[in-house]
Each structure stands twice: as C-alpha cells, then as structure tokens.
Image: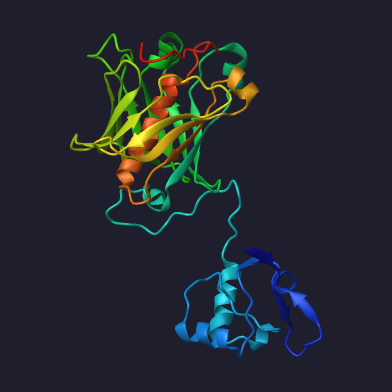
Amino acid sequence: MKMLKILAASQRKCLSYKTFADIYPNLGTACVISLVAPNTPIYQHHHSRDCGREQEILLSTFLMNLCWHHQQKLIMLCFSPMKKKGGWMNMPQGNPNVPPGLEYLTTIDQLLVHQKVELLEAFTGFETQNKYTIKNSVGQKVYYAVEDSDCLTRNCCGPLRPFDMKILDNYKNEVIHLNRPLACDSCWFPCCLQNMEVSSPPGTVIGSIQQEWSILTPQFNIKNAAGDVVLKIEGPICTFSICGDVEFKILSKDGSSQVGKISKQWAGLLREAFTDADYFGITFPMDLDVKMKAVMMGACFLIDVMFFEKQGNRESDRPGMF
C-alpha cells in the first residue's frame, strides 16, 4: 500500500494543480492501493460490481472527472482519522452478546502487554503496584491495567501476594476485573495452588485460571463461568529468560493441539537485569469467545507475577515447580 497525496484541480483552473492538503488543510493523506483511469475495462468492471473496498479508489487526472459515487468515497476516506502509532484503538461496533468493553477483542487475535518501568522499584527494590499497557498488533492501545494491592503484602509476600487488577479502557471505565487470592505455587503444596478469577463487567464472573499440580512444567486450566475447562496452558521446565523468549503454550481442551501462546519476550539486557518490567505477547484464535480472550489476559498477568516478578530486585526463577 502506498501513501499518496491525491492531486486535485480547482474548478475552471485545469492548469493549476493543488493537493488536498492545500484545498482542505484538515484532511489527512489517503491510503490508495491502485489508480485506475476512467473509461477503461478495469474501471467499468470495478464500477459495475460496486466494490466495497474503501481503500481502492478509481482516479482520473482531475477530481472533477470522477463519478459522484467515487467522489464521495474519496472524500469519506480522506475525512476518516489517521491511525497513529501509539494512539488508542477504535472500538468496533457494539455486539449485544459481548460484555461492555470487550468489543475490542472481537477483531483481535494478538495482544502485546508492556509493563511500565517504576523508577522507585528499580533503584530501591521497594515493590510498587504494577501497571501495564495492552496493545494490539499494530501498536494501538487497547486497555490499561493497574494492580490494586497494599504496600505490606507487596513487600512481605512478594510474587505470592494477593491482589486485584483493574483493566480500563480509553475512557477510564473498568471493563475487566481480576482477583488473585493468597496461595502457594509449589508442588509441595498441592492443596493450595494458584488461581485467578476474571469478571466482566466487574462482579460478573466470566472465567478463571486454575493451576494444576505438576512437578516439572507449569500447568494451568482455563475455565469458563460454569467451571468447564475450555483451554490448557503448559509452560517450559525452565522459565529463565536468557536473551530469548519464554513460551507458554495454549493448548486445546484435550491438550492435543496448540492454538496459541503466551510468550515472555526478551526486553533488553538493562531492562531485564535491573527491573521486572516485562514484555509479553498473547496469541489466540480470532474466533475464540471474547470472554475467553479476556481470561487469557488474566492468565498472562498471573504468569508474569508467578515466574517473572522480582522481589527486592532479586530473581526468584527456579527450574520446575519446586
């Protein structure tokens, strides 16, 4: 796709060319795939089938030579806001069967989770509340997540601490709520393993993440609101991040096939050595229920705290689940 400034001639001044930016200073640059001259077989074929692809525009030498249909199409495209990297994702049209705020997830099969660097924690080792930015695959912000916990449990319990997590949309509305109670994660305590409850809207449980007892590899069950297992997560024996990604496989209910993954991405030597601000990527099927996509976000946060959270700037990784 090429970024083109579309030339337009002012009326009755065919020799004086101006850009849309000159004529309409508030317009953005249009994204155009192909330029097709009028009165050609390609033009007639395209026009007759009334193609709905908004990025495919038929242009002539002058804007005045366009038919009314394509003039309107061109103007609508130019008036549409440009998608800037780092901005917020536009909300898709509402679906009555989707909890409010989860509409974003209907068109997403990949999420990027970036933890914010806390300078106080980096320099002193004093545990602060974790904050995350959740983006789509093109870098647009989708949600913002904030940990809700008290100072005592953060600094005394470390990675095992109980906490709530509020996931907010662009308008600061809480659309997803995560609750993690105090529990162990070692194979020596099989009766008190990790779990997290996911609600959307807050107060309405849509699923949960339950750690399964294992010795060598981390095992989790992803459950729906009824408590039925929908997916499984299996991690590696060693979760040390040494100049590479650490992948947790998302498996089908019977564990026979991989349908996605949660990967802890290498964030650079300095960031990895002196902070616990991590980068994660989550991939899942596009047609997965949006409620389960929200639960997968909760699984990402649970994995981060269990395996990649430092206590006093000291690594707590260990092989297996000992």
> Does 219 sit above or below residue 318?
below
Is 264 in front, or is 106?
A: 264
From the top left corner, tell me how far across and down residue 63 is, in percent.
Answer: 67, 83
Q: Say which quarter of the image contains residue 9.
A: bottom right
Can I make out residue 28 in this image?
no
Is 8 in front, or is 165?
A: 8
Is 31 in front, or is 170?
A: 31
Question: Which colour scheme appears in the figure?
Answer: rainbow
Is 314 in front, or is 20?
A: 314
Residue at (47% x, 19% y) in the render: 309
From the top left corner, tell me how far across and down residue 321 is, in percent.
Answer: 36, 15
201 to the left or right of 12: left
> Does 261 sit above or below residue 40?
above
User: Which quadrant, please, contains the N terminus?
Assistant: bottom right
Can I make out residue 228 in this image?
yes
> Does 28 sit above or below residue 316?
below
Residue at (59% x, 74% y) in the render: 75
User: Which quadrant, please, contains the C terminus?
Assistant: top left
Farthest residue, direction right: 15
From the top left corner, tell me how far across and down residue 107 is, in percent.
Answer: 41, 53
Q: Could you tell me how many numbered marks the image carries?
A: 0
From the top left corner, tell me how far across and down residue 314 is, in percent.
Answer: 53, 11
231 to the left or right of 107: left
183 to the left or right of 37: left
Residue at (51% x, 85% y) in the render: 45
23 to the left or right of 284: right
Q: Say which quarter of the image contains residue 192.
A: top left
